[in-house]
Image (tube, rainbow, N blue to C red):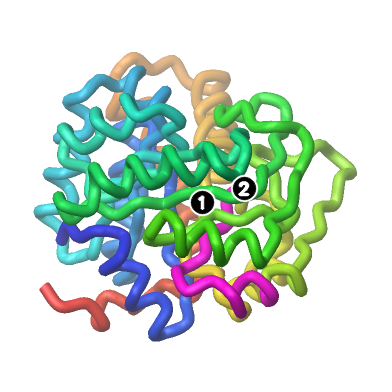
Amino acid sequence: MLINMTELLSVAERFDFAVPAFNIGTGQLLKAVMDTCEALNAPVILAIHPEELKFQGDAFAAQCLYAAHHSRVPCVIHMDHGDKIEDMLKAIRLGFTSVMIDASHLPFEQNVAITKQVVALAHPLNISVEAELGTIGSTEGDMEKASGEIIYTDPGMAAEFVRLTDCDCLAIAIGTAHGIYPKGFVPELKLDLLSEIKGQVSVPLVLHGGSSNSDAEIAESIRRGVRKINISSDVKDAYYQELRLTLRDLVVREPFALYPASMQAAKRIIKEKIELFNAQDKIKHYKD
C-alpha cells in the first residue's frame, strides 16, 4: 500500500510509535526489508539516497513502487537527503511519495527559501516534504558526508522554520551522527532538547543517524515524540559482514546462493529496529 509521509506519520503520532526509514541500496535489501515488515505487520519508509539511486538506476524506483503497490504494508518511497532541486524533481518524476530537501548546511534564510520551493513543487502532487534544521554529525565512511560537528536545533527557530516553509516533518539535531560510531565513542542524545522542540513544533519529528545509539535512548526519544527514525549503517554493516564470511568460506557464483545468509543477517537487525520503535502490528491502524 503506497502512501505519502504525512499519511504514514499521522498514524504514528496518534499511536505513539516511530516508523523506520531503511536505506535500501540494493534489491536484496529491499526484499529483506519488505519480508520483515510483512512478517511483523509494520509500516515502513523505503529511503533511497541520491547516490543509491544513481548507482542502481531509475528502474530501481519502479521496483520499489511495485513492491509497495503489491504489499498490504503501508509504504512510503522517500528520497533521502537530496540537497538539490534536481534531486527533488527526479524523485517526483519517478513516483516517490516523499522527498527530503536537506539544506541544513545553509544559513537559516536560504534553508527556508529552498524548502519553500520544494514544498511548492511537491504539495500539489500530494508528495510530502521533509526538511532539516541544525546539522547532524558524520562518522568516517558515512554516505551523507555531513559535517563532523553537530549544530543542535534551536526550538524557537524550528517552530519558525515550520511556520515559514509548511514542511510536513522536520529532522532535528539532538546529538546523533550518521554512520557507525568509532570504537569507544558513546553518543548521548539531548533528550530535554527534544522535548523542548516537540513542545513548539507542530509537525512530526525525525531522527537521523539512528544507528549505534543505545536502545534506551532511542526508546525514550520515541516516547518524547520522534516519529521517524533513519536506519542505514546498522543494517548494511550486518549484511556485508555476513557476506564477507560467505565469500571466505564458500565458492559460490550464483546470486541466489551468495546472498541469502546476508539477507538473514540484515533481517535480524531490521526486526530489532521495528520492535525497538514499537512499529510492529501497527498496519491495523491504516486503511487501504
Quadrant of the image for the C terminus?
Answer: bottom left
Extreme residue in the right direction: 184
Element type at mark 2? loop
* Residue behind mark 1: 230
Nearest to the observer: residue 268 or residue 30: 30
Q: Residue 265 appears at what percent x and percent y?
A: 49, 45
Q: Give the alpha-carbon distance from disc 2 to disc 1, as whole Å.
A: 6 Å
Q: Which one is in front, 128 or 24?
A: 128
Q: Residue at x 17, y 57 (%)?
A: 2
Which mark is on residue 209?
2
Callouts 2 and 1 close, C-beta under 8 Å: yes
Comparing 26 with 55, the one in front is 55
**Amino acid tagged 2:** Gly
Say above or below: 28 vs 251.
below
Q: Is residue 206 magenta?
A: yes
Kindly state the secondary structure of the residue where label 1 is placed: strand
Q: Is residue 141 above or below residue 1?
A: above
Q: Residue at x 43, y 60 (%)?
A: 169
The residue at 42%/79% (across/down) is 13
Q: Residue at x 25, y 34 (%)?
A: 91
